[in-house]
Image (spheres, rainbow, N blue to C red):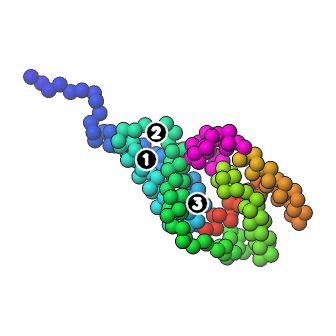
Amino acid sequence: MAPCFTAEPTSSDAASQLEQEVVRLYQEHASSLSRYAVWLAQNQEGARDAVQEAFLRYFIERRYGREVVNPRAWLYQVLRNYLLDLRRSAADREIIADNLDQMPGNQQNPERILRRSEVAHALESLLSTREFECVRLRAEGMEYAEIGAAMGIRPGTVGALLARAQTKIRRSAEGDESTSWGTAEAIRLLFEKHEAYS
């Protein structure tokens, strides 16, 4: 009697599908997760470790057969929680000092570099950590619901935080008579400052 075969995937087929799923997600989201991680971790090595940890946890979650409805938001949330846990456990962590030599465009006029750094510091001091984090995630193309899931807040709160951040940035840019920074330019300056750590 001939053996009866079923159409069910073998465990090696399932493992291969899972591997392809993780590779696809990595290709789609690793660079934006890395930028976000650098901002949270304030160093490249910690950011790289955190991104790897997020994808490892995703793989484990899926390997156990658990469904992840929104993988991008899930990865951001795991990454954020992982780095915040590290930050809490390392209370004596050294704060990284600004280094103007690392600022992008260091071939420019030193006065302009200093002015851009001062503007970035002033703008950053206006925003709460949550406001800046919302702006950062929105700049990565995330929807309000995804940002909310990543940060553990409601989408309405995300909208309020983004609106408040934009108002603060706009007022600061309008109040600075020595330059004409627009909201978009101000946000870019903030991101340049944080990417200087990478």
Which residue position is annotated with label 3? 40
Residue 64 shows in this picture: yes
Near mark 3 (Cα within 10 A), the count class, few <14, some 14-19 or many ≥20, is some
Q: Position of residue 68 (x, y in %)?
A: 46, 39
Magenta span contains residue 165: no
Quarter assignment of residue 67 = top left
Q: Position of residue 175 (x, y in %)?
A: 88, 59
Q: Residue at x 77, y 73 (%)?
A: 114
Residues in magenta? 136-160
Which residue position is annotated with label 1? 58
Local SS, label 2: loop
Q: Residue at x 32, y 43 (%)?
A: 15
Question: Of the residues under marks 2 and 3, which one precedes in the sequence?
Answer: 3
Instruction: Give the numbered dot on residue 68.
Output: 2
Which amino acid type is marked by label 1?
A: Tyr
Q: Secondary structure of the magenta portion, mostly?
A: helix
Q: Are marks 2 and 1 in contact (CB under 8 Å)?
A: yes
Q: Position of residue 187 (x, y in %)?
A: 73, 56
- In the image, residue 122 sits, relative to residue 81, either above or below, namely below
Q: Residue furthest left?
A: 1
Question: Of the residues under marks 1 and 3, which one precedes in the sequence?
Answer: 3
Q: Residue at x 76, y 48 (%)?
A: 164
Q: Residue furthest right?
A: 177
Q: Residue at x 53, y 48 (%)?
A: 77
Q: Position of residue 65 (x, y in %)?
A: 36, 38
Residue 14 is left or right of residue 192, and the answer is left
Which amino acid type is marked by label 2?
A: Val
Which amino acid type is marked by label 3?
A: Leu
Q: CA distance from mark 1 to mark 3?
A: 20 Å
Local SS, label 1: helix
